[in-house]
Image (cartoon, rainbow, N blue to C red):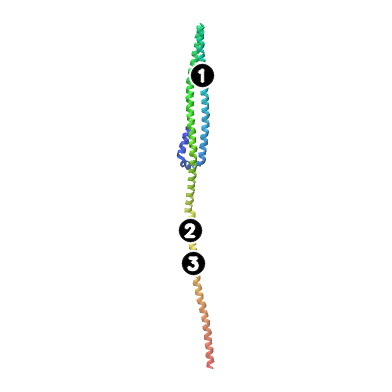
Amino acid sequence: MFRFFNRVRTIVSSELNSLLSKAEDPSKMLDQYIIDMEKDIADVQSSVAQQIANERVLKSKLEDATEQVAKREEQALRALQSGDEDLARRVLEDKNKLQANANSLQVAHEEALKLSEELKEKLTEMREELNEMKMKKDSLKARSESAKAREKVNKTLSGMGNGAKSGFERMEEKVILNEAQADSSEELRSMNKSLDDELAVFDKNSAVDSELAALKAKLSQTNEQ
């Protein structure tokens, strides 16, 4: 009858580690254990009530049998006082039978009373255990939620290290590469621009030199005339 409570004590003693290893939700499991314990207590309480009722029935029968024995003894005494020894003898014989029955009821009642007391003690122990489990349940639930929170944070951090963080670093390297490429293209553009400027100046100087040579030739012809 009480093996269930021993099993529950073992499970609760192992607390969250065992529950989490089985992929069970500790909060839901703890609530279910409390419900199961309350149901067992209700069943045991019904059994205890039945046993107490049996003990009281035996007690009532014992009291009746004891009264009958006392009554027969009184009747035998009155018969003897009236001079009817034969009647007194028969009454005493019946009294002895009633006494044997009373003795049997006495033994049965004592055993029933003892069992009733034992069951009531067990029921009290079960209720105390239930109250202890209820008080411990809130603490275990809080610890369970804390464990879940820590696990979630650790998984998130781990994911950042393997995924988001490495991706972030990869994008950083790509930005640095793009910046380097932009700097290179800017430098190349500057170099090309300088060359074009020099060529433009060269072309301009060449044109001026040609015009100057033409003027010199024209002036020379004029002087010769």
Task: Tell me, yes or no, whether the two marked residues, 2 and 3, touch with CB atoms within 8 Å.
Answer: no
| Residue for point 48% across, 58% down | 170
Given residues 35 and 18, the one toward you in this image is: 35
Specify few, some or many for label 3: CA neighbours under 10 Å numbering under 14, 14-19, or 20 or more: few
At mark 1, the secondary structure is: helix
Reading the chain from its start, which is encountered first: label 2 or label 1? 1
Q: Compared with residue 84, is residue 161 higher up or lower down, i.e. above or below? A: below
Q: Which numbered circle lies on residue 77? A: none
Reading the chain from its start, which is encountered first: label 1 or label 3? 1
Q: CA distance from mark 2 to mark 3?
A: 20 Å
The nearer-to-camera label among 2 and 1 is: 1
Specify few, some or many for label 2: CA neighbours under 10 Å numbering under 14, 14-19, or 20 or more: few
Q: Whole-percent x and y of residue 13?
A: 45, 38
Task: Tell me, yes or no, whether the two marked residues, 1 and 3, touch with CB atoms within 8 Å.
Answer: no
Q: Which numbered circle lies on residue 63? A: 1
Q: Whole-percent x and y of residue 166?
A: 47, 56
Under mark 2, the amino acid is Arg
Given residues 103 and 8, the one toward you in this image is: 103
Under mark 3, the amino acid is Asp
Hey, which residue is sitting farthest bottom in the picture?
Answer: 225
Under mark 1, the amino acid is Glu
Hey, which residue is sitting farthest top in the picture?
Answer: 83
> Which residue does the numbered mark 2 point to in the structure image?
170
At mark 3, the secondary structure is: helix
Rendered-image quadrant of the C terminus: bottom right
> Which residue does the numbered mark 3 point to in the structure image?
183
Task: Tell me, yes or no, whether the two marked residues, 2 and 1, touch with CB atoms within 8 Å.
Answer: no
| Residue for point 48% across, 26% down | 117
Specify few, some or many for label 1: CA neighbours under 10 Å numbering under 14, 14-19, or 20 or more: some
